[in-house]
Amino acid sequence: MSDKKLVPIPGSERAPLPGARAVAPADPSERVEVTVLLRPGSSLQALAAPETLTARLPSERRYVSRKEFERAHGASPDDIAQVETFAQDNHLDVVQISPGARTIRLSGTVGDLSAAFGVELQQYEYAGGTHRGRTGAIHVPASLAGIVEGVFGLDNRPAASPHFRRLPDEHSATLGAQASMAFKPTQVAQLYDFPATFNGAGQSIGIIELGGGYRLTELKTYFAGLGIHKPKVVAVSVAGGHNHPSGDLNSADGEVMLDIEVAGAVAPGAQIVVYFAPNTDDGFLNAIKTAIHDDIHKPSVISISWGASESGPPNTSWTQQAMQAFNETFQAAAALGVTICCAAGDNGSSDGVNDGLAHVDFPASSPFVLACGGTHLEGTGTTITQESVWNDGSSGGATGGGVSQVFGLPTYQAEAGVPPSANSGGQPGRGVPDVAGDADPQTGYQVLVDGRLAVIGGTSAVAPLYAGLVALVNQALAQPIGFLNPLLYDQAHAAGAFHEIVDGNNGAYQAHPGWNACAGLGSIDGAKLLSALGGES
């Protein structure tokens, strides 16, 4: 007999997007897939063991394999069986079970899903288009309370935006003039003294994309122009997403090509695996989980250049259940030895929220990721002549950064001098970013997108830049460095492995010596980082 009493899932509450209005009930016959997230088989707190995450050198760290992780922390067979029974009782099909990721993918009609989870799904219109949505909480039978931590996919509003900025055409009619202050990715790597004797061979770089696509022939042309053999690039479809280039330079194609071309230029010997998923919290979460638990391609570093304000208008970008699920997934990545690099955003200290307050971008604000901010970079050869905070008032672009209102101050930032939030009340929290790199479109990256040469910047470029560096360091050390943040704030900082950024601001926060909420510890000197971690260039 099925359990008829429904109880709300804590943190699942939703509110409409600003300006959105319900125009009709969602089609009850439409078939939809959702993801049910289950509790871990044992506490994830064990993943924070010092020898796993906080050892002073990568050689002292102990990681678990993906199979070991699944056995220790994956969903239990009993919990999975209970959700399977729930699905059968509610006319839902089980599409996929992933014990290590703790997810069960279910399929059913809108009508059956609405009844099963105690929600009323509506069709909404908003300034950006239409989406299927809900308000209030998602519900599950009382027997599943505590077993089910979240349900994703009922609401398919956009979850995130790409953090790239293209140098406008009006700045120049030709790439030649545009590129007077722009760089090839290889030139940026030289300015930051990335280890030149390594190419990322044997490493796998994962890239998360929520739209757009690439063409292999175009990548071959681009890398040939750099004098580099094209790295192996593989597309993985997640939750219905796929490699689908639109042909529009200003679309998500710009993000996809920027990510691949920057990471590939830095580490051409690495395999690049691009995980394509729909731009929903369901697609985003599944893409990250798929990458982290991918036992075929085994990425040791993942680049994420998509995000949204962690605390904008209530429950419009992120639900509490989503942020918790993402953060737990990043914590799992740390235990597996996978480094996560996230763009910190391109809208300054407001992060694009027009409420007069300071905000930071998520997932960059997770304490388990490397948050990547942006700078304006000038230099020649291996010499940096000037580097300051990226804040271009004429285009409105500026590096994200600030103090989280969701996540507390992590241990590794305890001595970094992270200030209280610039908002009234000045609450302490996780400081963003951790590091920074070239992001100003004026000093951006020369890339090829949809047959056109362009100059693109944004913190989107910094995440794949440092993902490429991680691949080089992993190759040099012959093991993954994994959760990088404690290493950066300790021995890497002590070894002077950063170019401190002391000039400029991102709105509410001013750069200054030491860690700051515009550029973090600064831009990384790759050779000094490798040396600080026990390697040789």
Image (spheres, rainbow, N blue to C red):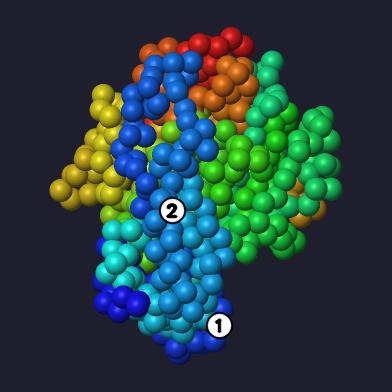
Please tell me the numbered disc located at residue 426. Answer: none
Q: Nearer the viewer, mark 2 or mark 1?
A: 2
Where is the N terminus found, in terms of image quarters? bottom left
Residue at 25 percent of width and 41 percent of height: 408
Residue 70, x across and y down, in percent: 47, 42
Q: According to the image, label 1 marks what residue?
A: 30
143 or 66: which is nearer to us? 143
**Marks 2/1: CA–CA distance:** 30 Å
Residue at 45 percent of width and 90 percent of height: 24
Residue 220: image quadrant is: top right
Residue 258: image quadrant is: top right
Q: Mark 1: which amino acid?
A: Glu
Q: Residues within 10 Å of mark 2 (few under 14, many from 20)?
A: few
Residue 414, x across and y down, in percent: 25, 28
201 or 525: which is nearer to us? 201
Q: Does 243 sit left or right of 394 as displayed? A: right
Q: Residues within 10 Å of mark 1 (few under 14, many from 20)?
A: few
* Mark found first going from the N terminus, 2 or 1: 1
Asked which secondary structure carries label 2, the reply is helix
Asked which secondary structure carries label 1, the reply is loop
Q: Does 292 sit left or right of 321 as displayed? A: right
Q: Does 469 sit left or right of 2 as displayed? A: right
* Residue 440 visible here: no
Residue 90 in the image: above or below residue 527: below
